[in-house]
Image: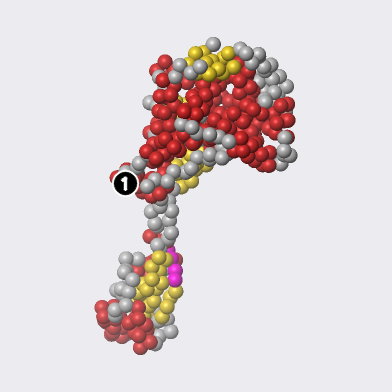
Protein backbone atom coordinates (compact mmCIF):
# COMPACT_ATOMS: atom_id res chain seq x y z
CA UNK A 1 0.00 0.00 0.00
CA UNK A 2 1.22 3.50 -0.83
CA UNK A 3 0.90 6.18 1.82
CA UNK A 4 0.94 9.59 0.20
CA UNK A 5 1.70 12.70 2.18
CA UNK A 6 -1.78 13.84 3.20
CA UNK A 7 -3.23 17.01 1.83
CA UNK A 8 -3.85 19.56 4.53
CA UNK A 9 -7.64 19.47 4.59
CA UNK A 10 -7.94 21.74 7.60
CA UNK A 11 -5.51 24.43 6.56
CA UNK A 12 -3.57 25.02 3.30
CA UNK A 13 -0.09 25.85 4.57
CA UNK A 14 1.06 27.76 1.51
CA UNK A 15 -1.94 30.01 1.86
CA UNK A 16 -0.64 30.92 5.29
CA UNK A 17 2.75 31.66 3.81
CA UNK A 18 1.18 33.70 1.04
CA UNK A 19 -0.74 35.89 3.43
CA UNK A 20 2.17 36.26 5.81
CA UNK A 21 4.19 37.53 2.85
CA UNK A 22 1.32 39.63 1.57
CA UNK A 23 0.76 41.33 4.90
CA UNK A 24 4.19 42.89 4.69
CA UNK A 25 3.35 44.64 1.45
CA UNK A 26 -0.39 45.11 1.65
CA UNK A 27 -0.17 48.39 3.53
CA UNK A 28 2.18 49.73 0.83
CA UNK A 29 -0.45 49.44 -1.90
CA UNK A 30 -1.38 53.01 -2.62
CA UNK A 31 -3.34 52.55 -5.81
CA UNK A 32 -5.75 49.64 -5.45
CA UNK A 33 -8.13 48.89 -8.28
CA UNK A 34 -11.59 50.35 -7.68
CA UNK A 35 -14.20 47.58 -7.58
CA UNK A 36 -16.62 47.55 -10.45
CA UNK A 37 -20.26 46.87 -9.88
CA UNK A 38 -20.99 43.45 -8.43
CA UNK A 39 -23.64 43.12 -11.12
CA UNK A 40 -21.16 43.14 -14.04
CA UNK A 41 -20.36 39.59 -15.17
CA UNK A 42 -16.82 38.43 -15.93
CA UNK A 43 -17.68 34.79 -16.72
CA UNK A 44 -20.43 32.20 -16.37
CA UNK A 45 -19.46 28.67 -15.36
CA UNK A 46 -22.27 26.11 -15.73
CA UNK A 47 -24.85 28.84 -15.01
CA UNK A 48 -22.88 30.20 -12.01
CA UNK A 49 -21.68 33.76 -12.29
CA UNK A 50 -18.20 35.11 -11.59
CA UNK A 51 -18.66 38.82 -11.18
CA UNK A 52 -16.25 41.56 -12.13
CA UNK A 53 -16.03 42.35 -8.42
CA UNK A 54 -14.89 38.75 -7.71
CA UNK A 55 -12.22 39.15 -10.38
CA UNK A 56 -10.99 42.49 -9.08
CA UNK A 57 -10.80 41.24 -5.51
CA UNK A 58 -8.72 38.23 -6.53
CA UNK A 59 -6.50 40.47 -8.63
CA UNK A 60 -5.81 42.61 -5.58
CA UNK A 61 -5.03 39.56 -3.46
CA UNK A 62 -2.71 38.16 -6.13
CA UNK A 63 -0.91 41.43 -6.74
CA UNK A 64 -0.53 42.20 -3.05
CA UNK A 65 1.00 38.78 -2.43
CA UNK A 66 3.35 39.25 -5.41
CA UNK A 67 5.08 42.03 -3.50
CA UNK A 68 4.67 44.62 -6.21
CA UNK A 69 2.51 47.72 -6.26
CA UNK A 70 -0.22 47.13 -8.83
CA UNK A 71 -0.21 49.18 -12.01
CA UNK A 72 -2.73 49.32 -14.82
CA UNK A 73 -0.39 47.28 -17.05
CA UNK A 74 0.14 44.61 -14.39
CA UNK A 75 -3.60 44.33 -13.88
CA UNK A 76 -4.18 44.02 -17.64
CA UNK A 77 -1.58 41.25 -17.95
CA UNK A 78 -2.73 39.33 -14.87
CA UNK A 79 -6.47 39.51 -15.52
CA UNK A 80 -6.77 36.58 -17.99
CA UNK A 81 -4.82 34.14 -15.82
CA UNK A 82 -6.68 35.22 -12.67
CA UNK A 83 -10.01 34.77 -14.42
CA UNK A 84 -8.93 31.31 -15.61
CA UNK A 85 -8.02 30.45 -12.01
CA UNK A 86 -11.42 31.59 -10.78
CA UNK A 87 -13.14 29.50 -13.47
CA UNK A 88 -11.12 26.47 -12.42
CA UNK A 89 -11.90 27.03 -8.75
CA UNK A 90 -15.59 27.33 -9.53
CA UNK A 91 -15.44 23.98 -11.33
CA UNK A 92 -13.65 22.47 -8.35
CA UNK A 93 -16.32 23.73 -5.94
CA UNK A 94 -19.09 22.49 -8.21
CA UNK A 95 -17.50 19.03 -8.28
CA UNK A 96 -17.21 19.05 -4.51
CA UNK A 97 -20.88 19.98 -4.22
CA UNK A 98 -21.82 17.19 -6.64
CA UNK A 99 -20.01 14.74 -4.35
CA UNK A 100 -21.70 16.23 -1.26
CA UNK A 101 -18.35 17.36 0.14
CA UNK A 102 -18.72 20.08 2.72
CA UNK A 103 -16.27 22.62 4.12
CA UNK A 104 -17.36 23.98 7.45
CA UNK A 105 -17.14 27.60 8.53
CA UNK A 106 -15.13 26.33 11.49
CA UNK A 107 -12.43 24.92 9.17
CA UNK A 108 -12.14 28.24 7.38
CA UNK A 109 -12.20 30.22 10.61
CA UNK A 110 -9.42 28.02 11.97
CA UNK A 111 -7.35 28.93 8.93
CA UNK A 112 -7.89 32.65 9.40
CA UNK A 113 -7.20 32.37 13.13
CA UNK A 114 -3.99 30.48 12.56
CA UNK A 115 -2.75 33.15 10.15
CA UNK A 116 -3.37 35.79 12.78
CA UNK A 117 -1.61 33.77 15.48
CA UNK A 118 1.42 33.14 13.29
CA UNK A 119 1.66 36.85 12.53
CA UNK A 120 1.15 37.77 16.23
CA UNK A 121 -2.14 39.45 15.44
CA UNK A 122 -5.20 39.84 17.56
CA UNK A 123 -8.49 38.41 16.35
CA UNK A 124 -9.84 40.60 13.53
CA UNK A 125 -6.49 42.22 12.68
CA UNK A 126 -6.12 40.24 9.45
CA UNK A 127 -9.40 41.53 8.10
CA UNK A 128 -8.37 45.10 8.86
CA UNK A 129 -4.97 44.71 7.16
CA UNK A 130 -6.52 43.18 4.06
CA UNK A 131 -9.09 45.92 4.04
CA UNK A 132 -6.37 48.57 3.89
CA UNK A 133 -5.14 46.93 0.66
CA UNK A 134 -8.66 46.87 -0.74
CA UNK A 135 -9.15 43.10 -0.30
CA UNK A 136 -12.27 41.81 1.42
CA UNK A 137 -11.57 38.95 3.83
CA UNK A 138 -14.29 36.92 2.09
CA UNK A 139 -11.97 36.65 -0.93
CA UNK A 140 -9.43 34.90 1.27
CA UNK A 141 -12.09 32.73 2.90
CA UNK A 142 -13.37 31.62 -0.49
CA UNK A 143 -9.89 30.64 -1.63
CA UNK A 144 -9.37 28.63 1.56
CA UNK A 145 -12.75 26.96 1.08
CA UNK A 146 -11.89 25.94 -2.50
CA UNK A 147 -8.51 24.48 -1.59
CA UNK A 148 -9.95 22.44 1.26
CA UNK A 149 -12.85 21.21 -0.86
CA UNK A 150 -10.67 20.22 -3.80
CA UNK A 151 -8.24 18.46 -1.48
CA UNK A 152 -11.15 16.38 -0.18
CA UNK A 153 -12.26 15.60 -3.75
CA UNK A 154 -8.78 14.35 -4.67
CA UNK A 155 -8.57 12.31 -1.47
CA UNK A 156 -11.95 10.69 -2.04
CA UNK A 157 -11.95 10.13 -5.79
CA UNK A 158 -8.33 9.72 -6.87
CA UNK A 159 -6.02 8.71 -4.04
CA UNK A 160 -7.70 5.31 -3.44
CA UNK A 161 -7.21 4.42 -7.13
CA UNK A 162 -3.47 5.12 -7.23
CA UNK A 163 -1.33 2.00 -7.09
CA UNK A 164 2.41 1.64 -7.48
CA UNK A 165 3.82 -1.69 -8.60
CA UNK A 166 6.80 -3.14 -6.80
CA UNK A 167 8.59 -3.51 -10.14
CA UNK A 168 8.33 0.27 -10.55
CA UNK A 169 9.76 0.79 -7.09
CA UNK A 170 12.55 -1.69 -7.77
CA UNK A 171 13.47 0.11 -10.99
CA UNK A 172 13.43 3.48 -9.25
CA UNK A 173 15.55 2.08 -6.41
CA UNK A 174 18.08 0.84 -8.94
CA UNK A 175 18.22 4.28 -10.60
CA UNK A 176 18.59 5.94 -7.20
CA UNK A 177 21.45 3.64 -6.25
CA UNK A 178 23.19 4.51 -9.51
CA UNK A 179 22.96 8.21 -8.64
CA UNK A 180 24.43 7.83 -5.16
CA UNK A 181 27.30 10.27 -4.80
CA UNK A 182 25.71 12.70 -7.26
CA UNK A 183 23.78 15.81 -6.32
CA UNK A 184 20.32 16.00 -4.77
CA UNK A 185 18.25 19.14 -5.14
CA UNK A 186 15.83 20.95 -2.83
CA UNK A 187 13.27 22.27 -5.31
CA UNK A 188 10.04 24.21 -5.50
CA UNK A 189 7.98 24.16 -8.68
CA UNK A 190 5.20 25.97 -10.44
CA UNK A 191 3.38 23.80 -12.97
CA UNK A 192 1.09 25.30 -15.62
CA UNK A 193 -0.94 22.74 -17.53
CA UNK A 194 -1.41 23.04 -21.30
CA UNK A 195 -4.91 21.64 -21.68
CA UNK A 196 -5.11 22.14 -25.43
CA UNK A 197 -2.86 23.29 -28.28
CA UNK A 198 -4.97 26.45 -28.55
CA UNK A 199 -3.88 27.52 -25.05
CA UNK A 200 -0.17 26.82 -25.52
CA UNK A 201 0.78 30.43 -26.29
CA UNK A 202 -1.42 31.80 -23.51
CA UNK A 203 0.21 29.50 -20.97
CA UNK A 204 3.68 30.33 -22.32
CA UNK A 205 2.95 34.04 -21.89
CA UNK A 206 1.71 33.41 -18.34
CA UNK A 207 4.89 31.48 -17.53
CA UNK A 208 7.12 34.29 -18.79
CA UNK A 209 5.18 36.83 -16.72
CA UNK A 210 5.47 34.68 -13.59
CA UNK A 211 9.23 34.32 -14.08
CA UNK A 212 9.51 38.09 -14.39
CA UNK A 213 7.55 38.50 -11.13
CA UNK A 214 9.72 35.98 -9.32
CA UNK A 215 12.97 37.49 -10.53
CA UNK A 216 11.61 40.86 -9.51
CA UNK A 217 11.35 39.69 -5.91
CA UNK A 218 7.94 38.02 -5.66
CA UNK A 219 7.72 35.20 -3.10
CA UNK A 220 7.90 31.84 -4.91
CA UNK A 221 5.66 29.98 -2.46
CA UNK A 222 3.02 32.68 -2.80
CA UNK A 223 3.11 32.70 -6.59
CA UNK A 224 3.03 28.89 -6.67
CA UNK A 225 0.04 28.75 -4.35
CA UNK A 226 -1.81 31.28 -6.47
CA UNK A 227 -0.92 29.89 -9.90
CA UNK A 228 0.49 26.35 -9.90
CA UNK A 229 -1.66 23.42 -11.00
CA UNK A 230 0.60 20.79 -9.43
CA UNK A 231 -0.62 18.78 -6.43
CA UNK A 232 2.06 20.46 -4.34
CA UNK A 233 0.60 23.92 -5.02
CA UNK A 234 -1.08 23.92 -1.60
CA UNK A 235 2.42 23.61 -0.10
CA UNK A 236 3.85 26.48 -2.10
CA UNK A 237 5.18 24.11 -4.79
CA UNK A 238 7.57 22.41 -2.36
CA UNK A 239 8.88 19.19 -3.96
CA UNK A 240 11.39 18.48 -1.18
CA UNK A 241 14.74 16.82 -1.94
CA UNK A 242 14.82 15.10 -5.34
CA UNK A 243 17.43 13.53 -7.57
CA UNK A 244 17.45 13.60 -11.34
CA UNK A 245 15.88 10.14 -11.57
CA UNK A 246 12.70 11.41 -9.87
CA UNK A 247 11.85 14.34 -12.17
CA UNK A 248 10.81 14.68 -15.83
CA UNK A 249 13.75 14.50 -18.23
CA UNK A 250 13.41 18.14 -19.29
CA UNK A 251 13.46 19.25 -15.66
CA UNK A 252 16.43 16.99 -14.96
CA UNK A 253 18.44 18.71 -17.68
CA UNK A 254 17.89 22.14 -16.13
CA UNK A 255 18.37 21.46 -12.41
CA UNK A 256 22.16 20.97 -12.54
CA UNK A 257 22.56 24.31 -14.33
CA UNK A 258 20.82 26.37 -11.63
CA UNK A 259 22.49 28.21 -8.77
CA UNK A 260 20.98 28.08 -5.29
CA UNK A 261 18.04 30.55 -5.04
CA UNK A 262 17.89 30.87 -8.83
CA UNK A 263 14.57 30.75 -10.70
CA UNK A 264 14.64 28.84 -13.97
CA UNK A 265 13.34 29.93 -17.34
CA UNK A 266 10.05 28.24 -18.29
CA UNK A 267 10.59 24.54 -19.06
CA UNK A 268 8.14 23.17 -21.62
CA UNK A 269 7.09 19.51 -21.54
CA UNK A 270 4.30 17.57 -23.22
CA UNK A 271 1.94 18.08 -20.28
CA UNK A 272 2.74 21.70 -19.47
CA UNK A 273 5.31 24.24 -18.36
CA UNK A 274 7.47 24.06 -15.23
CA UNK A 275 9.13 26.94 -13.39
CA UNK A 276 11.69 25.83 -10.81
CA UNK A 277 13.32 27.41 -7.78
CA UNK A 278 16.50 25.68 -6.62
CA UNK A 279 16.59 26.23 -2.85
CA UNK A 280 19.61 24.08 -2.02
CA UNK A 281 21.78 21.21 -3.25
CA UNK A 282 23.75 18.51 -1.51
CA UNK A 283 25.82 15.47 -2.33
CA UNK A 284 23.72 12.33 -2.38
CA UNK A 285 24.79 9.32 -0.38
CA UNK A 286 27.92 7.81 -1.90
CA UNK A 287 29.04 4.21 -1.85
CA UNK A 288 31.01 3.40 1.28
CA UNK A 289 34.65 4.45 1.18
CA UNK A 290 36.58 1.29 2.15
CA UNK A 291 39.16 3.38 4.00
CA UNK A 292 36.42 4.60 6.36
CA UNK A 293 35.50 1.09 7.50
CA UNK A 294 36.09 0.70 11.24
CA UNK A 295 37.83 -2.47 12.48
CA UNK A 296 38.79 -3.92 15.84
CA UNK A 297 42.24 -5.47 15.41
CA UNK A 298 44.27 -7.81 17.60
CA UNK A 299 47.83 -8.98 16.93
CA UNK A 300 50.46 -11.48 17.89
CA UNK A 301 53.85 -9.78 17.84
CA UNK A 302 57.09 -11.75 17.62
CA UNK A 303 60.07 -9.43 18.12
CA UNK A 304 63.24 -9.68 16.03
CA UNK A 305 66.22 -7.73 17.32
CA UNK A 306 68.11 -5.62 14.83
CA UNK A 307 71.32 -7.59 15.37
CA UNK A 308 69.69 -11.04 15.37
CA UNK A 309 71.21 -13.67 13.06
CA UNK A 310 69.26 -14.66 9.98
CA UNK A 311 68.39 -18.00 11.51
CA UNK A 312 66.65 -16.33 14.47
CA UNK A 313 64.62 -14.12 12.15
CA UNK A 314 63.62 -17.08 10.04
CA UNK A 315 62.59 -18.98 13.16
CA UNK A 316 60.23 -16.17 14.19
CA UNK A 317 58.82 -15.97 10.66
CA UNK A 318 58.18 -19.73 10.67
CA UNK A 319 56.35 -19.46 14.00
CA UNK A 320 54.29 -16.55 12.65
CA UNK A 321 53.31 -18.57 9.58
CA UNK A 322 52.26 -21.48 11.81
CA UNK A 323 50.11 -19.15 13.95
CA UNK A 324 48.55 -17.58 10.85
CA UNK A 325 47.69 -20.99 9.40
CA UNK A 326 46.35 -22.65 12.54
CA UNK A 327 44.68 -20.02 14.73
CA UNK A 328 40.88 -20.05 14.44
CA UNK A 329 39.01 -16.97 15.63
CA UNK A 330 39.64 -14.22 18.14
CA UNK A 331 39.27 -16.42 21.23
CA UNK A 332 41.92 -18.78 19.90
CA UNK A 333 44.13 -15.78 19.12
CA UNK A 334 43.72 -14.53 22.72
CA UNK A 335 45.15 -17.85 23.94
CA UNK A 336 48.12 -17.50 21.59
CA UNK A 337 48.67 -13.94 22.83
CA UNK A 338 48.86 -15.24 26.41
CA UNK A 339 51.30 -17.97 25.42
CA UNK A 340 53.56 -15.63 23.43
CA UNK A 341 53.41 -13.02 26.21
CA UNK A 342 55.19 -10.22 24.35
CA UNK A 343 54.44 -6.57 25.30
CA UNK A 344 53.10 -5.53 21.91
CA UNK A 345 50.82 -8.54 21.49
CA UNK A 346 47.14 -7.96 22.25
CA UNK A 347 44.30 -5.61 21.29
CA UNK A 348 45.37 -2.75 19.02
CA UNK A 349 41.91 -1.21 19.41
CA UNK A 350 39.09 -0.05 17.16
CA UNK A 351 40.36 2.14 14.33
CA UNK A 352 39.50 3.18 10.80
CA UNK A 353 41.39 1.35 8.10
CA UNK A 354 42.59 4.75 6.91
CA UNK A 355 44.35 5.28 10.26
CA UNK A 356 46.34 2.03 10.19
CA UNK A 357 49.94 1.97 8.93
CA UNK A 358 49.90 1.14 5.20
CA UNK A 359 51.36 -2.38 5.65
CA UNK A 360 48.79 -3.22 8.34
CA UNK A 361 45.93 -1.74 6.30
CA UNK A 362 46.89 -3.83 3.27
CA UNK A 363 47.07 -6.96 5.43
CA UNK A 364 43.63 -6.62 7.11
CA UNK A 365 41.36 -4.73 4.68
CA UNK A 366 40.21 -7.91 2.92
CA UNK A 367 40.16 -10.20 5.98
CA UNK A 368 36.94 -11.72 7.25
CA UNK A 369 36.20 -11.33 10.94
CA UNK A 370 38.17 -14.03 12.85
CA UNK A 371 40.61 -14.64 9.99
CA UNK A 372 44.36 -14.27 10.64
CA UNK A 373 46.57 -12.32 8.26
CA UNK A 374 49.73 -13.51 6.65
CA UNK A 375 52.80 -12.49 8.67
CA UNK A 376 53.69 -8.81 8.30
CA UNK A 377 57.43 -8.03 8.66
CA UNK A 378 58.42 -4.69 10.18
CA UNK A 379 61.69 -3.28 11.54
CA UNK A 380 60.78 -4.48 15.05
CA UNK A 381 59.61 -8.00 14.23
CA UNK A 382 56.74 -10.04 12.79
CA UNK A 383 53.01 -9.35 13.24
CA UNK A 384 50.02 -11.65 12.77
CA UNK A 385 46.85 -9.54 12.66
CA UNK A 386 43.20 -10.48 13.06
CA UNK A 387 40.00 -8.46 12.59
CA UNK A 388 37.63 -9.19 15.49
CA UNK A 389 34.92 -6.72 14.46
CA UNK A 390 34.15 -4.65 11.38
CA UNK A 391 31.66 -1.82 10.83
CA UNK A 392 31.02 -0.04 7.55
CA UNK A 393 30.28 3.70 7.79
CA UNK A 394 26.59 4.51 7.95
CA UNK A 395 25.41 6.02 4.70
CA UNK A 396 22.10 7.47 3.59
CA UNK A 397 20.85 5.15 0.90
CA UNK A 398 17.66 5.37 -1.16
CA UNK A 399 14.56 5.04 0.99
CA UNK A 400 12.08 2.59 -0.50
CA UNK A 401 9.01 4.13 1.16
CA UNK A 402 10.04 7.63 0.03
CA UNK A 403 10.56 6.46 -3.55
CA UNK A 404 7.21 4.65 -3.58
CA UNK A 405 5.56 7.79 -2.22
CA UNK A 406 7.22 9.99 -4.87
CA UNK A 407 5.98 7.74 -7.68
CA UNK A 408 2.48 7.79 -6.21
CA UNK A 409 2.49 11.55 -5.78
CA UNK A 410 3.58 12.07 -9.38
CA UNK A 411 0.78 9.78 -10.55
CA UNK A 412 -1.73 11.53 -8.32
CA UNK A 413 -0.61 14.90 -9.69
CA UNK A 414 -1.12 13.73 -13.26
CA UNK A 415 -4.56 12.32 -12.43
CA UNK A 416 -5.59 15.55 -10.69
CA UNK A 417 -4.59 17.58 -13.75
CA UNK A 418 -6.60 15.25 -16.00
CA UNK A 419 -9.54 15.50 -13.61
CA UNK A 420 -9.70 19.30 -13.82
CA UNK A 421 -9.06 19.13 -17.58
CA UNK A 422 -12.06 16.83 -17.97
CA UNK A 423 -14.19 19.12 -15.82
CA UNK A 424 -13.23 22.04 -18.08
CA UNK A 425 -13.94 20.03 -21.21
CA UNK A 426 -17.44 19.09 -20.05
CA UNK A 427 -18.30 22.52 -18.63
CA UNK A 428 -20.17 25.34 -20.30
CA UNK A 429 -17.98 28.40 -19.74
CA UNK A 430 -18.81 31.80 -21.17
CA UNK A 431 -16.39 34.72 -20.84
CA UNK A 432 -17.87 38.21 -20.96
Residue 347 percent location from the top left of the image:
42, 78
Q: Residue at x 48, y 16 (%)?
A: 429
Callout 1: SS: helix
**Residue 323 in sight from this viewpoint:** yes
Residue 414 percent location from the top left of the image:
40, 32
Residue 20 forms part of the magenta stretch: no
- Eyeballing the image, is 121 above or below 387? above
Which of these two is toward me, 297 or 78? 78
Q: Residue at x 56, y 40 (%)?
A: 10
In screen coordinates, is 250 left or right of 32?
left
**Residue 72 in sight from this viewpoint:** no
Q: Residue at x 37, y 47 (%)?
A: 1
Residue 80 percent location from the top left of the image:
54, 17
Q: Tell me the residue that label 1 is attached to.
A: 166
Q: Residue at x 72, y 35 (%)?
A: 124
Q: Answer few, some or many: residues within 10 Å of disc 1's Cα (few below 14, many 20 plus, some between 14 and 19).
A: few
Chain part drawn in magenta: 350-354
- Eyeballing the image, is 348 above or below 57? below
- In the image, farthest residue toward the front: 100
Q: Quadrant of the C terminus?
A: top right
Magenta-colored segment: predominant secondary structure: strand
Q: Quadrant of residue 72?
A: top right
- Eyeballing the image, is 325 above or below 231? below
Please say which color scheme the image uses: secondary structure
In screen coordinates, is 76 left or right of 158?
right
The mark total stands at 1
Residue 38 percent location from the top left of the image:
64, 16
Amino acid sequence: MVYFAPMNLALPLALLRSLLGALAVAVALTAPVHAQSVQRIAAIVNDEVISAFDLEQRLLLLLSSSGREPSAEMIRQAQPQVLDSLVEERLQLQEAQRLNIQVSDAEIADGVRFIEEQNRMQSGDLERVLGRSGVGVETLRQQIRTQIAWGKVISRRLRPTVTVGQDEVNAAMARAEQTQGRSEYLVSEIFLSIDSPARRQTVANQARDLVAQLRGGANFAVVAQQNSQGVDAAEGGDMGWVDLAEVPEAVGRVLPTLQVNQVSDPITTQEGIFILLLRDRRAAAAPADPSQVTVNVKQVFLPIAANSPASAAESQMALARTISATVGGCTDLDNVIKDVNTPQSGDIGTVKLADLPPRFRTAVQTLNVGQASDPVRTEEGVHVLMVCDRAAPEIRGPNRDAIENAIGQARLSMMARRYIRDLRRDAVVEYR
